[in-house]
Amino acid sequence: MVGTPFLVSTLVFLLTQYVTNFLSSGAIHMENQGAQRIAMASTEGLVVGFSTASSSEEARSIAENLIVKNLAACVQIVPAVESVYEWKGELVKSAEVLMIIKAQRQHAQAVVQAIKEKHSYEVPEVVFTEIVDGNTDYLQWARAATQPRGS
């Protein structure tokens, strides 16, 4: 048949146009938005906290207390940091231990209080920053690890 190649090429052209329009219509974009929502949901409410302690022993005591109370999923203890600051009009340079704390935003003030209870400093540093993105599996674990027991 003389018209068959023309018909086939026309159908291929139309099908290509349809697929191109479908892909650019937002169907894939909607799928990507769904993936972004899942990623955002996995980071929602999680924060990284930073605090320092005067010794490894003090940091360990604070970290264990936070974990036992389900206020933190994990606390890394980083030895041998040096802090320079002004305290009561004096320039201070001190060797400290850094704690990196993964917690839920809703627990931030409870974390602050738990640190103050165990800390030797009059005004311990405790600051938080939002987690923007990360390993979804880890973030889900961190959220689960900071749920009240029995949840």
Image (cartoon, grey):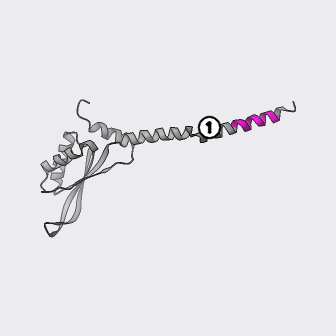
Residue 51 located left or right of residue 138: left
Tell me if residue 20 comes above or below residue 87 in the rendering.
above
Q: Is residue 115 left or right of residue 143?
A: left
The location of residue 38, given as percent across then percent down, is 42, 38
| Viewer can see residue 119 | yes
Residue 127 in the image, given as x and y percentages of width and height: 25, 53
Q: Quadrant of the N terminus?
A: top right
Quadrant in the rendering for residue 36: top left
Amino acid, disc 1: Phe
Number of marks drawn: 1
Residue lying at the far front of the rendered structure: 25
Image point (69%, 38%), residue name: 16
Count neighbours of disc 1 (C-alpha within 10 A) and say few if under 14, some if 14 to 19, many if 20 or more.
few
As for residue 116 lying within the magenta part, the answer is no
Is residue 6 part of the magenta span, yes or no?
yes
Residue 83: percent from left, percent from top: 22, 64
Residue extent of the magenta highlight: 5-15
Label 1 sits on a secondary structure element that is helix
Q: Position of residue 87 (x, y in %)?
A: 15, 65
Please indicate, yes or no, whether residue 73 appears anywhere in the rendered image: no
Which residue shows up at 13% across the image and 66% down it?
Answer: 88
Q: Which residue is mark 1?
A: 22
Quadrant of the drawing holding the C terminus: top left
Asked if 74 appears above or below 88 in the picture, the reply is above
Query: From what the image shows, is residue 124 above or below residue 147?
Result: below
What residue sits 18% from the left and 52% below the top?
Answer: 59
Q: Quadrant of residue 96?
A: bottom left
Q: Which secondary structure class fits the magenta region best?
A: helix
